[in-house]
Image (tube, helix red, strand yellow):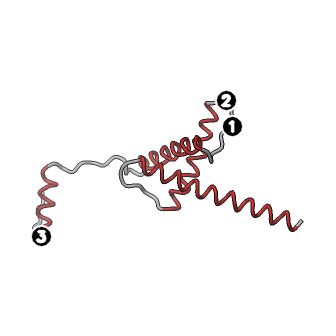
Amino acid sequence: MDGQIMELARYWAHELLVWVGFGTLVGLAAKAIMPGRDPGGAVGTMLMGIAGSIIGCALLLFFVEKGRITPISPLGFVVGTGGAFIILLFFRILNHSFFVEAEDGWRGRWRRWYRRRRYYYED
């Protein structure tokens, strides 16, 4: 009985570490594809990669009837990266960091020039 518990704990620890490593790789690949500055740190990247793998594989299984897809495979990596990319895109849109508003024409340029010289230009 005690040997079975240790074997089961070893199995789940192995599965957890594989998913953490794979999720980190998928999240990093999605962040490399998306241009610009990305929100989130290492834990956010890992969780985004794991969730992207689950979403990407589920979408692939929804549209393709035959076969079995495992997330830890080349095809699973591709669809996982796509799922993580979609999660990152929605996060950026909802966080208002995807669309950046332009400055106010020439006035913005003059303000920066005056700020460097410690003069203040007010409208």
> Dot 3, how many residues are within 10 Å of its Cα: few (below 14), some (14-19), or many (20+)?
few
Q: Where is residue 45? Give x, y as percent.
A: 50, 56
> Dot 1, how many residues are within 10 Å of its Cα: few (below 14), some (14-19), or many (20+)?
few
Residue at the disc numbered 3: 118
Residue at the disc numbered 1: 68
**Looking at the picture, which amino acid does disc 1 mark?**
Arg
**Looking at the picture, which amino acid does disc 3 mark?**
Arg
Q: Residue at x 87, y 68 (%)?
A: 2
Q: Which mark is residue 65?
A: 2
Q: In which quarter of the image is the N terminus?
A: bottom right
Mark 1 vs mark 2, CA separation in Å: 9 Å
> Dot 2, how many residues are within 10 Å of its Cα: few (below 14), some (14-19), or many (20+)?
few
Q: Which residue is drawn at 63% across and 30% down?
A: 64
Mark 1 vs mark 3, CA separation in Å: 65 Å
- Residue at the far right: name it: 1
Q: Where is residue 115? Give x, y as percent.
A: 14, 65
At mark 3, the secondary structure is loop
